[in-house]
Image (cartoon, coloured by chain):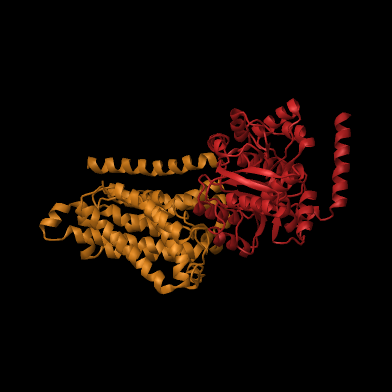
């Protein structure tokens, strides 16, 4: 069997391979994308999606699901485009408050043993309502430093690629390679034994939700840096995109089995899938379906690999 | 022989057009894309059909090399932003946009401008300064309704106002125009106002609900479109005299008006925005690519139907649809000249 790839390796190779296949197809369909300028335009909107996906990954890691991340990112975008731009101190305080609110949500879900789907679904309306209050009509301005960062044109390698690699590596090292990260993931894998070993599950959940809130804030700020202004509905799509991104990147809904690098790759794959279908000139009525089909194909491949793994 | 004659005729017209519009050939290698955020109602469907009709003719006449329409699958800002960036990558020379958000697309629009792409927004406009805007003057539309009534009813009287969807900018604008018209003409009083949500069934229920509390001498009903037929049904059911109901170019409204006109000489007018405004945006984009000097802010002309051109417009409106008009290059030049 030594000549064949192990299912485990295959499984971790699946996300990058899907991404590579998609990229090759896009380069072939639209050679113009194969340039510094092209890659920049193709990938820059994937950065906020990747950050939102990382946020979702932290939640999935402790066996919960966040249906409010889209509304949350929209609210952050609205605050970034208004308060953070006009009165930076108030803006920073508001964003820090939002992260604390996320930690409190984690505590609430843990202490009252509430289903996270219900709590976050409810919160999504709260975030959206707050976003409308902060910014009743679309507008605002991106703070200059965020705009500068997001439109950075470094030599040779387009900024979106550098940003994705940095995000993936930082989270990978923190969550997958550090002792503390192992404990955090353990809260999803085997919470009971973790508790018996003396760790506070409450603190872990609060920490994970706070991390999710932090990356949600980064996502909203990055989004405003790209769009230059905000809209209360700007990121509603991110809820589903982020969940799909984590799963596409090799994560599981339960068991603390997640992969930060995979999640970033999954988010980029989803963003590129839209471009790919658009370059194909597919009728828009079919595009949602086609996007779903790409997801199903990748997941079906994973199930096949999973079976091979189980047979061993 | 007949076809030969047709070809000759066609060539003469084409030559005539070329002579008249010396600049036309300059855009023959240019490609224009339509980025549309939503296609889920009859107005948008008509808009896309008009685009298809006018641009395919322009492409076959060699005015432009391509004019492709793209609609996002979901009406979402981030999705349309990505779509616009894809269109830049596909090498279009101009992008015509009906935007999901006036502000949320500005980053992508800026990317397009920086890449040398001409951006023209219409209906759902964008605020990025580098783009052109073809906006609707909804306020003037509301005012025009009252001015028409003032002309028809020199003695003035009580009006019923049917508003649109609460909290939407369009509703506020049209209503502001109506109130401005009332203040300016000084002979009307708005006896009551209800929200009809631009839908016949909602308008009918709302009007039926408010009628008992209104004085008997309502002389006119000012509307926002899509609500005139429902109002007429409610007033008919109450047994009151039919006031002048301003219509909004919907097929059912025009049909009802025609029936009344034939039966008892009922007179009114109808006004709305033609979905064919997409074709106006197309020609404006073509003119900009051509090097014409076009102001950044243009205004869409209204499509107004009066007593004498009702039959003609009704015949051109499909059942369940909205009266439409497709714009020509000359119309676009007229609009541009008007904005100078």
Query: Residue B220: image x %, image y %?
Result: 67, 40
Instruction: Specify whether A277 is left or right of A55.
Output: right
- Who's the residue at 15% across and 61% down the image? A199
- Who's the residue at 51% across and 42% down the image? A287
Q: The N terminus of chain B lies in which quarter of the figure?
A: top right
- The chain coloured orange in the image: A
Do we see residue A6 in this rendering?
no
Instruction: Specify whether B80 is left or right of B15.
Output: left
- Who's the residue at 72% across and 52% down the image? B185
The one nearer the camera, B228 or B272, is B228
Quadrant of the image occupied by residue A282: top right
- Who's the residue at 27% across and 54% down the image? A61
Instruction: Specify whether A99 is left or right of A152.
Output: left
B56 up-or-down from A177: above or below? above
Query: Residue B308: image x %, image y %?
Result: 80, 36
The one nearer the camera, B136 or A60, is B136
Do we see residue A145 in this rendering?
yes
Instruction: Specify whether B11 is left or right of A161.
Output: right
- The mark tally for this picture is 0
Specify the colour of chain B: red
Q: The C terminus of chain B lies in which quarter of the figure?
A: bottom right
A39 up-or-down from A63: above or below? below
Query: Residue B290: image x %, image y %?
Result: 76, 57
* Residue at the top extreme, as displayed: B263
Query: Residue A134: image x %, image y %?
Result: 45, 61
């Amino acid at each position: 069997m030594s000549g064949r790839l192990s299912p485990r390796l295959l499984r971790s190779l699946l996300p990058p391979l899907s991404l590579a296949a998609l990229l090759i197809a896009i380069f072939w369909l639209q050679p113009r994308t194969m340039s510094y300028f092209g890659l920049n335009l193709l990938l820059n909107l994937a950065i906020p999606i990747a950050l939102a996906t990382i946020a979702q990954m932290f939640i999935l890691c402790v066996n919960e699901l966040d249906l409010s991340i889209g509304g949350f990112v929209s609210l952050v975008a609205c605050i970034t485009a208004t308060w953070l731009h006009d009165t930076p101190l108030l803006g920073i305080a508001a964003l820090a408050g939002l992260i604390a609110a996320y930690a409190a949500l984690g505590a609430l879900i843990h202490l009252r043993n509430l289903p996270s789907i219900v709590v976050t679904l409810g919160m999504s309306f709260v975030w959206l309502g707050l976003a409308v209050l902060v910014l009743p009509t679309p507008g605002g301005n991106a703070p200059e430093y965020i705009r500068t960062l997001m439109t950075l044109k470094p030599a040779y390698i387009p900024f979106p690629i550098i940003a994705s690699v940095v995000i993936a590596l930082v989270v990978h090292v923190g969550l997958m390679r550090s002792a503390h990260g192992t404990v955090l993931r353990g809260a999803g894998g085997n919470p009971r034994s973790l508790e018996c070993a003396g760790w506070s599950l409450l603190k872990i959940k609060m920490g994970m939700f706070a991390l999710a809130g932090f990356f949600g804030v980064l996502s909203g700020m990055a989004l405003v840096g790209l769009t230059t202004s905000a809209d209360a509905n700007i990121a509603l799509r991110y809820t589903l995109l982020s969940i799909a991104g984590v799963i596409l990147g090799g994560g599981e809904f339960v068991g603390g089995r997640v992969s930060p690098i995979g999640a970033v790759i999954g988010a980029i794959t989803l963003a590129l899938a839209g471009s790919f279908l658009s370059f194909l000139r597919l009728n828009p009525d079919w595009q949602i379906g086609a996007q779903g089909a790409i997801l199903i194909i990748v997941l079906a491949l994973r199930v096949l690999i999973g079976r091979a793994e189980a047979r061993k | 022989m007949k076809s030969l004659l047709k070809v000759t005729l066609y060539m003469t017209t084409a030559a005539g057009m070329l002579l008249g519009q010396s600049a036309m050939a300059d855009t023959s290698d240019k490609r224009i894309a339509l980025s549309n955020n939503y296609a889920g109602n009859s107005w948008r469907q008509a808009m896309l059909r008009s685009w298809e009709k006018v641009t395919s003719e322009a492409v076959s006449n060699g005015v432009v090399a391509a004019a492709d329409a793209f609609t996002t699958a979901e009406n979402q800002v981030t999705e349309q932003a990505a779509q616009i960036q894809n269109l830049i990558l596909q090498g279009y020379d101009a992008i015509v946009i009906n935007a999901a958000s006036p502000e949320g697309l500005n980053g992508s629009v800026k990317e397009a401008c920086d890449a040398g792409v001409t951006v023209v927004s219409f209906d759902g406009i964008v605020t990025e300064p580098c783009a052109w805007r073809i906006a609707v003057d909804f306020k003037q539309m509301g005012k025009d309704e009252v001015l028409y009534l003032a002309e028809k009813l020199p003695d003035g009287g009580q009006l019923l106002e049917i508003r649109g969807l609460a909290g939407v900018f369009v509703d506020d604008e049209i209503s502001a125009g109506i109130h401005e018209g009332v203040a300016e003409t000084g002979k009307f009083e708005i006896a009551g106002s209800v929200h009809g949500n631009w839908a016949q069934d909602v308008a009918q229920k709302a009007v039926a609900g408010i009628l008992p509390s209104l004085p008997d001498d309502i002389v006119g009903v000012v509307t926002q479109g899509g609500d005139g037929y429902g109002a007429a049904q409610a007033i008919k059911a109450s047994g009151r005299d039919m006031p002048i109901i301003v219509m909004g170019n919907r097929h059912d409204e025009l049909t009802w008006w025609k029936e009344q006109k034939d039966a008892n000489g009922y007179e009114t007018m109808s006004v709305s925005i033609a979905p064919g405004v997409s074709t106006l945006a197309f020609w404006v984009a073509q003119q900009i690519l051509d090097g014409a000097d076009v102001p950044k802010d243009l205004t869409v002309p209204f499509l107004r139907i009066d007593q004498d051109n009702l039959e003609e417009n009704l015949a051109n409106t499909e059942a369940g649809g909205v009266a439409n008009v497709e714009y020509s290059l000359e119309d676009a030049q007229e609009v541009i000249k008007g904005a100078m």
